[in-house]
Amino acid sequence: MVDRRAAGLPIEHVLGWAEFCGLRIAADPGVFVPRRRTEFLVRRAASLARQAAKPAGQAPGRPRTFVVDLCCGSGAIGAALVAVLDGVELHAVDVDPAAVRCARRNVAASGGQVYEGDLYQPLPATLRGRVDVLVANAPYVPAGAIGLLPPESRIHEPRVAVDGGADGLDILRRIAAAAPLWLAPGGHLLAETSERQAPQAVGAFARSGLIPRVASSSELNATVVIGTRPAPSSGPRG
C-alpha cells in the first residue's frame, strides 16, 4: 500500500474508501474521489430537501422527497443525503460504467437507483416535474487547466469526471437547460462551481427559467449555485 501511494495513487484508491460526510464511501480505482468541499453542497441540499418534504397523510409507501444526483461519480452525494434525510427516493446517474458500479455499492442499502447514461437520458419519465432536489457535481475544470491539476487527479481520475469544456461550464449549461422539465414547482437545482465561474453559472440558470442564487463556504472553499423552479403563485402544490 505504501508503494502504491508513493507511486502517486490517491490515498482513497489505495485504501478503497473515502471519508465523506462522516460516511465511508467505497472509492474504486479510476473513479472520481469525493472532495471535502462538496460536503457544503450536501448540507445545502439537505436543508432544501427538508423544506420540500411533503406533509404527512399522503398515500402509504409514497416517498416524501424525490432526489436526483447527476454526474454522481461514486454516489457519495446521494448516499450522504439518504443518510441524513427521511423518506427519500434517490435516483443517480453517471456516464462512466466504473462510476456506476461503484455508486451502486454505495447506495445499495438505501434502495436508491443508479443509472448509466448521459445526464437525464436514463431517468424514468415518471420523474418529470416531480424532482424536489436535483444535485449536480458536474465536471467544471476548464479543459485548458486540466494539466495544472495534481497528478492524483490528472492521472488517476477519469477525464470525463473533471473536464468541463472550454470554460468549465459545458455540462452545467446542459443540466440547467433541462432542469425545469424535471424539477417540481418550487424544486431546486444545486451545482458546485468555482467562485470565478459562479456569475456565468448564475446566468445559465436564469436563462433556463430558474431563480438563481449563490451560496459559499470560506471554511471549505466551496461555491454552490442554486436555481429554484418558480412555484405557482397560489393554490396547493401538485
Image (cartoon, helix red, strand yellow):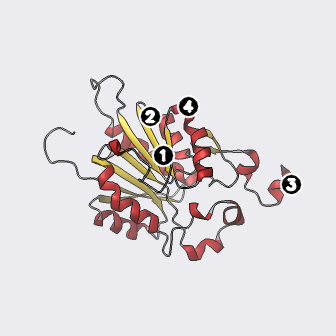
Q: Secondary structure at mark 4?
A: helix
The spot of residue 153 in percent (x, y) is 66, 62
| Residue drawn at 68 percent across, 55 percent down | 30
Can residue 126 be seen by looking at this rendering? Answer: yes
**Label ID, residue 185:** none
Q: Nearer the viewer, residue 218 or 102?
A: 102
Mark 1 vs mark 2, CA separation in Å: 16 Å
| Residue drawn at 42 percent across, 34 percent down | 88
Question: In the image, is residue 95 above or below residue 236?
Answer: below
- Tell which circle, 4 or 2, labels the residue nearer the N-terminal end: 2
Q: Secondary structure at mark 3?
A: helix
The spot of residue 181 in percent (x, y) is 30, 53
- Tell which circle, 3 or 4, labels the residue nearer the N-terminal end: 3
- Tell which circle, 2 or 3, labels the residue nearer the N-terminal end: 3
Which residue matches tag 1?
92
Q: Residues within 10 Å of mark 3 (few under 14, many from 20)?
A: few
Which residue matches tag 4?
109
Mark 1 vs mark 4, CA separation in Å: 14 Å
Q: Residues within 10 Å of mark 4 (few under 14, many from 20)?
A: few
Between circles 4 and 2, the one closer to the viewer is 4
**Which three-letter amino acid code belongs to the residue tagged 4?**
Ala
The spot of residue 80 in percent (x, y) is 52, 40
**Label ID, residue 3:** 3
Between circles 3 and 1, the one closer to the viewer is 1
Mark 4 vs mark 2, CA separation in Å: 14 Å
| Residue drawn at 38 percent across, 41 percent down | 49
**Label ID, residue 85:** 2
Mark 3 vs mark 1, CA separation in Å: 34 Å
The spot of residue 208 in percent (x, y) is 29, 63
Task: Check if mark 1's residue and mark 2's residue have beta carbons within 8 Å.
Answer: no
